[in-house]
Amino acid sequence: MAKFEPYFEKNAGDSVARSHTITGWDPEDQAAWQAGGEAIARRNLLWSVAAEHVGFSVWSLWSVMILFMPQSVYGLTAGDKFLVAATATLVGSALRLPYTMATARFGGRNWTVFTAGVLVLPVVATIVVLAEPGRPLWVYLACAALCGLGGGNFASSMTNINAFFPQRLKGWALGINAGGGNIGVPAVQLVGLFVIAIAGNRQPYWVCVFYLVALVVAGIGAARYMNNLDIVSVDTGAMRAALRNRHTWLVSLLYIGTFGSFIGFSFAFGQVLQISFTAGGQSAAQASLHAAEIAFIGPLLGSVARVYGGRFADRAGGGPVTLWAFVGMIGGVGILAVTATLAGHHTTTASMTWYVIGFVILFLLSGIGNGAVYKMIPSIFEAASRSLEADEKTRADYSRSMSGAVIGITGAVGGLGGVVINLMLRSSYLTHGTATVAFWDFAAFYAIAAFVTLRVYVRMPSGSAADEPTLVTARA
């Protein structure tokens, strides 16, 4: 039976010292799991979700701040605001690769505490920047880039939790972890709605104050209740091997369509609604309030759906669930494209209703697809490990290391989908005055992703679930 010592271990002087490092962790050991391993894993999952949740909120902070920034006061056009959102998304996505490696280097608990603390900087910077309207665009872009630090938390959190749970529960655990983190997006939008309703659309500082408190709570909770593992969940060798594996890039393509859609539309939904309400004749203040009243619904449903996507994939397989998610997303974005075409530049109550329906479909199905795609990753490499001519420990190390590496790479690449969504919407509005062209382009991409899923992960020959593996030896 594995020996778990999450709080006390012997030091060189043979005295008992407080420690947060677990030795001998093996979640596949049923006896150890029932003897206390499950409780430890669930506790780490709880605080991982809390810290990642706040990280997502800070990452998407500017999706709310733009509702407090009427053009007449701050001088930012709709195109500028899409650019601000794209900047935050880009930085958050790019940081996911180093954040994945950081968990293995510094430990899951230690890195979670650090990343919660460092997010105080962008929140304070946002308060300072918005206190004085009329700053040049680059100042807002720089502040949004700092908020992008919160986007990296996802990869380190997912890689860490992947190592805590057995294969049979990874879909559920990763779905809970990701879904709980994703809820940070609608949470910050709800906080923004509350502030707009109570204090108006000129006092965004209260949103930031709330998250300064939340960061302190998450950091203290992680420091007290999370653990580091003495096993390496991912290392540079695994990262190099993952970069050469074709499934890394195929799964990343699918994740662009699922998570990229979720985070991209989460940033853009409120802005699209605000533009539409303004086109319908509402004032800037009315449009901000009405957009805030609706914008949180989509990300909330998508976050919750992600949990169920992981559970569905545990039962039916990641491939089939992902395929049907993309098929449904084609229908959802088709509704948006037809609505935008018929409405043109004149928004009506009916067209707003169809906009909301189309976006809700996209959020729900992208959430389900998120959970299903991430379930596929450990399954692919667990299957690949069976062909290794090695003992069970080496196979488990290979599966864990490769899964952790691919989770990091996929998270980084997938997040870039959110950048593309905001840039394409910006281009469509600037060029045509509507989002019609962008919506049709999204539909074409979902069709490609559905075909790849069908061809590679649904209708594939037995035994071809993954490439012939190259043995990766984790660092001792």
Image: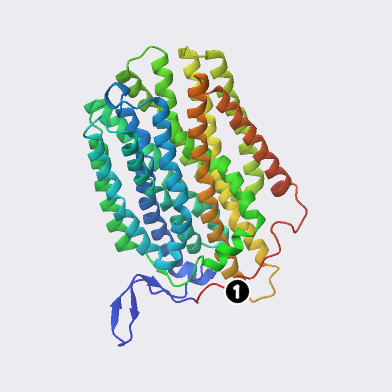
Extreme residue in the right direction: 461
Mark 1 — residue? 394
Instruction: State the image coordinates of residue 42 (x, y, percent, origin top left).
Output: 42, 59
- 289 on left or right of 356: left
Question: Vertically, is 125 above or below 131?
Answer: below
Instruction: State the image coordinates of residue 380 (x, y, percent, origin top left).
Output: 64, 57
Q: Is residue 248 visible?
A: yes
**Residue at 38% across, 66% down:** 227
Quadrant in the rendering for residue 167: bottom right
- 405 on left or right of 327: left
- Tell me the amino acid under the disc marked 1: Thr
Query: Label 1: few (<14), some or many (≥20) within 10 Å?
Result: some
Question: Vertically, is 82 above or below 395?
Answer: above
Q: Is residue 302 visible?
A: no
**Residue at 69% across, 43% down:** 452
Extreme residue in the bottom direction: 13
Front residue (pair 229, 151): 151
Question: Vertically, is 192 above or below 470?
Answer: above
Q: Secondary structure at mark 1?
A: helix
Quadrant in the rendering for residue 128: top left
Instruction: State the image coordinates of residue 272 (x, y, percent, origin top left).
Output: 44, 25
- 448 on left or right of 279: right
Instruction: State the image coordinates of residue 89 (x, y, percent, origin top left).
Output: 44, 42
